[in-house]
Amino acid sequence: MRRLLIISMLTLSLTSQVLIPAQAEGDAVAGAKIYLKCRSCHILEQPTNRMGPHLMQLLGRKAGSVEGFQYSPAMTEAGKTGLIWDEKNLKAFLTSPKTMIPGTSMRFWGLWEGQIDDLTAYLREQSQMKPAED
């Protein structure tokens, strides 16, 4: 009986790991609140530029490439040398924009790592929901 109980517990623990998906990194709901800090300069809902470029389809986009936005020479050069906004690069930039790209015109001091994970989850979710119409 004891052996059956042990086998059952092991089976349950192994199957529960398969059946319960791992939690995605970052919380999109919390990220929506963090995005409010970005919203005064960046639009996510439509391809319109403000003080900063729009953020539609940001993940996977080459840095400094939004049509009609006048980037700093530093950001333009970053794009020319191959900087793509993936989650790793976005995290490094949002931690300290002026450290990653000295000379950037982005006037923001940075976010904490957990905030960046949440914001990235929100941006990822929004990108999947609203395709760019360029």
Image (cartoon, rainbow, N blue to C red):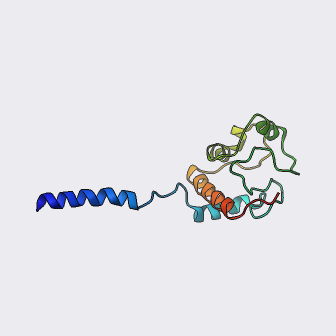
State the residue in front, 105 or 117.
117
For residue 84, above or below residue 43: above
In the image, residue 81 above or below residue 130: above
Q: Which of 133/116 is in front?
A: 133
**In the image, what residue occupies the spot 51% across and 57% down?**
24
Question: What residue is shown at x 64% (from left), y 64% (from top)?
Answer: 32
How many discs mark residues in the rendered view?
Answer: 0
- In the rendered image, the quadrant that contains the C terminus is bottom right
The answer to whether 54 is drawn above or below residue 85 in the figure is below
Q: Is residue 71 left or right of residue 99?
A: right
Residue displayed at 39% across by 61% down? 19
Quadrant assignment, res 102:
top right
Q: Residue furthest top?
A: 81
Q: Is residue 22 left or right of residue 8?
A: right
What residue is shown at x 77% (from left), y 47% (from top)? 106
Task: Give x and y (percent) for residue 39.
Answer: 74, 61
Q: Residue furthest left?
A: 1
Q: Is residue 14 left or right of residue 64?
A: left
Residue 70 coordinates in the image, percent (x, y): 87, 47
What quarter of the picture does the N terminus occupy?
bottom left
Residue 46: horizontal and vertical position, in percent? Answer: 79, 63
